[in-house]
Image: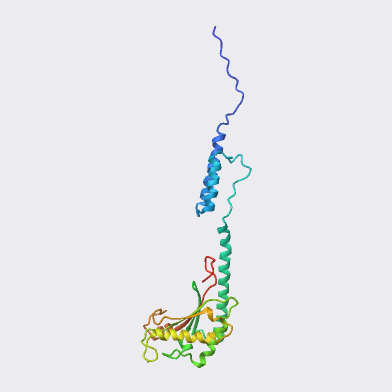
């Protein structure tokens, strides 16, 4: 009579062989997350961090389940300094805004709204002065009754931290009729220089921070098709330049 085979006793043991590949999967997912986190801006520091993580994962280092704490990716020094650079730029922009407010107050007090204009641009604070406030037609000499305006502007251009200031003369496209100046180039340059000369009479301004330019008729702000538009183009511009650029570097 054949012997009955004894049925193996089920001792209740659960197969846990799946745990190892699962832990490896989580480790790889962590590595992928680190790569995605750093891929937006790869530099030498971040590349070194990524390399160390992969070395640990693929060269037999600890897995996620064995690690006591998650991997920490330090912030590169260049990113940490970005906030300070941006803060310097914003502070400088606020300072330019205060200068603009002082100029606007002067314009309002002297009822010069139709003759002056101020605007913050990427190049700095631009102050536009119509030529009728300063000069007679075809002349580069500042009218005696308006010399006080130039002197008042000089007082508003005294800063605790000296800024580079560019004074530029502009004309319309009407050819010069007088013999004093051969072209609108010469007229625009001399208007800028003469205005700068009065500014420099103020002992508190730094002459080293100023420069003068003349653009003639070649940078109009309106078409030279009407007398009103030509009057807009005849102007002196004072550009007060920033101390700090958007990237946080000093303006040179």
Is residue 50 something one can see in this rendering?
yes
Is residue 234 something one can see in this rendering?
no
User: What colouring method underlies this structural image?
Assistant: rainbow
Q: Position of residue 72 (x, y in %)?
A: 59, 49
Q: On screen, 215 above or below 91?
A: below
Residue positioned most to the bottom: 144
Report how many numbered discs are placed on residues in the image: 0
Q: Position of residue 62 (x, y in %)?
A: 59, 40
| Left or right for 206, reference 217 | right
Q: Which is more toward the observer, 202 or 69?
A: 202
| Left or right for 16, reference 136 | right
Q: Which is more toward the observer, 120 or 217?
A: 217
Residue positioned most to the right: 68
Quadrant of the snapshot with the N terminus: top right
Q: Residue at x 58, y 59 (%)?
A: 80
Quarter location, residue 221? bottom left
Q: Position of residue 17 (x, y in %)?
A: 56, 31
Q: Position of residue 29 (x, y in %)?
A: 53, 43
Residue positioned most to the front: 208
């Amino acid at each position: 009579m054949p012997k009955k085979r004894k049925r193996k006793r089920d001792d209740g043991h659960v197969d846990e062989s799946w745990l190892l590949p699962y832990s490896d999967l989580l480790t790889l997912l962590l590595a992928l997350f680190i790569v995605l986190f750093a891929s937006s801006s790869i530099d030498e520091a971040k590349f070194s961090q990524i390399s160390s993580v992969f070395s640990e994962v693929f060269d037999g280092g600890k897995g996620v389940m064995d690690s006591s704490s998650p991997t920490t990716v330090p912030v590169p020094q260049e990113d940490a300094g970005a906030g300070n650079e941006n803060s310097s730029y914003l502070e400088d922009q606020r300072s330019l805004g205060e200068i603009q407010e002082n100029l606007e107050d002067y314009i309002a007090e002297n009822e010069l709204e139709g003759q002056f204009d101020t605007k913050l641009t990427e190049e700095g604070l631009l102050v536009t002065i119509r030529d009728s406030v300063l000069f007679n037609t075809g002349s580069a000499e500042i009218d005696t009754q308006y010399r006080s305006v130039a002197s008042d502007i000089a007082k508003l251009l005294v800063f605790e931290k000296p800024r580079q200031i560019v004074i530029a003369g502009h004309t319309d496209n009407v050819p010069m009729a007088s013999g004093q100046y051969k072209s609108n180039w010469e007229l625009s340059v001399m208007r800028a220089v003469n205005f700068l000369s009065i500014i420099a009479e103020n002992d508190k301004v730094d002459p080293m921070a100023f420069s003068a330019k003349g653009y003639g008729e070649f940078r109009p702000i309106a078409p030279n098709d009407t007398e009103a538009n030509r009057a807009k183009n005849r102007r002196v511009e004072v550009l007060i330049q920033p101390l700090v650029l958007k990237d946080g570097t000093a303006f040179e």
